[in-house]
Amino acid sequence: MHIAEGLLPAPYALGYGVGASVFVAAGLKDLTRKSKEVPMIKQFTGMMTAGIFLVSLLPIPVPITGTSSHPGGTPLGAILLGPWITSLVSLVALFFQAVFFGHGGITTLGANTLTMGVFGGLTGWLLFWGIRKLGGSLFYAGLIAGLLGDIVIYLGTSIQLALAIHGVHPVGDIFLIIFTGFLPTQAPLAVIEGLFTGFVLKYIAEHRPDMLIMLGVLKPDKGEGAYRHEA
Amino acid sequence: MRRNWRWLLVLAILAVVFMVTKNVSMPGADDQVSAVANKYAAEVGAKETKPLFNTAPSDLQLFIFALGGAVAGFWLGYNCHDLFGAQSKVKDRSEEARGQETRRGSK
């Protein structure tokens, strides 16, 4: 979800912007640190930015509802790059979408970065590693992370909007109106995003496991053969 | 499995052809929710405004995208080897370690 230009009252737009900037700063610091340890991280971050720019702009029609929406792409980004760098990546992707396509806005850039980059990314990352720690396979961990990460993006947007524009109405009522507006279109797309995340991770693990080892997604001592067995 | 993918692809193509020929409009869920949110936003003194930057399709937009695409393409090509090229040192190191173990075993 991209909150449109001007839709948030100034104090909220500023507040969300300040909140997002904390995570973006953490992303810059993390990227500087990782670029000393992982040789290809800057190139990979650039490529992921282009990927998230594309995926989060792509309107996918949902025939059941007669509407279209787009995935987030940030849960996958957070699994591969880490949640802090994903906040930075989201800010860049959302900035270009706002400037060139009028998708989202400059005044709402902080709010959109917070939901797509931070909420979606962090949820995906936490779920992925939680499921992996419990012994889940790479595909299923990616599937759940992508699916729920996508839903959390829209949950976050609904909360942000409800807090900012509820006025005299109860926050809960506005939240429900907005979230139920999203859910019928977004739920099938969340399933698609989950499958996409799982399949991408599985594909990289089968063809280039060294990349996942280098990014810290797979442990080096397990090796390629060990991965194939567990995935 | 491969056959299932073929069917899915055929279904997707048919769906696209149907939507194009029947002129089916699929409005964005973002826009629909924005319209609802705009009603409440107006009550607190905010409202959806036009984008700060003019995003109407123009030669300038085309130029920027062509330039951006060219720069990104060259950059990706330049770094292609790092991203998709030779296997990284992690695997090389593990192969080296396996070689050492084999040598130790043969001694």
Image (cartoon, coloured by chain):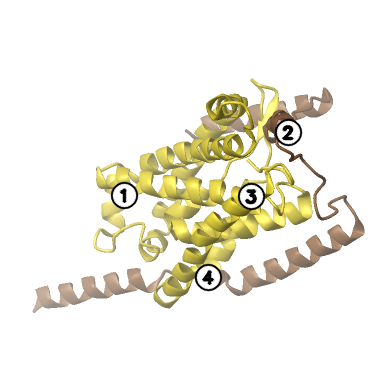
Q: Are marks 3 and 4 in contact (CB under 8 Å)?
A: no
> Can residue B82 be seen from the camera position used here?
yes
Quick one: label 3 or label 4, which is nearer the N terminus? 3
In this view, the residue farthest toward the left is B107
Query: Most extreme residue toward the right, as rendered?
Result: B59
What is the CA distance from the residue labelled 3 to the residue labelled 4? 34 Å
Circle 3 residues within 10 Å: few <14, some 14–19, many ≥20: few
**Residue at the location (66% across, 30% down)?**
B12
Q: Would residue A32 be found to the left or right of residue A161 on screen?
A: left
Q: Which mark is residue A228?
A: 1
Residue A142: % across, % down: 41, 43
**Quadrant location of the N terminus of chain A?**
top right
Label 3 vs label 4, nearer the camera: 3
Residue, disc 4:
A42
- Residue on which disc 3 sits: A11
Q: Amino acid at mark 2?
A: Asn
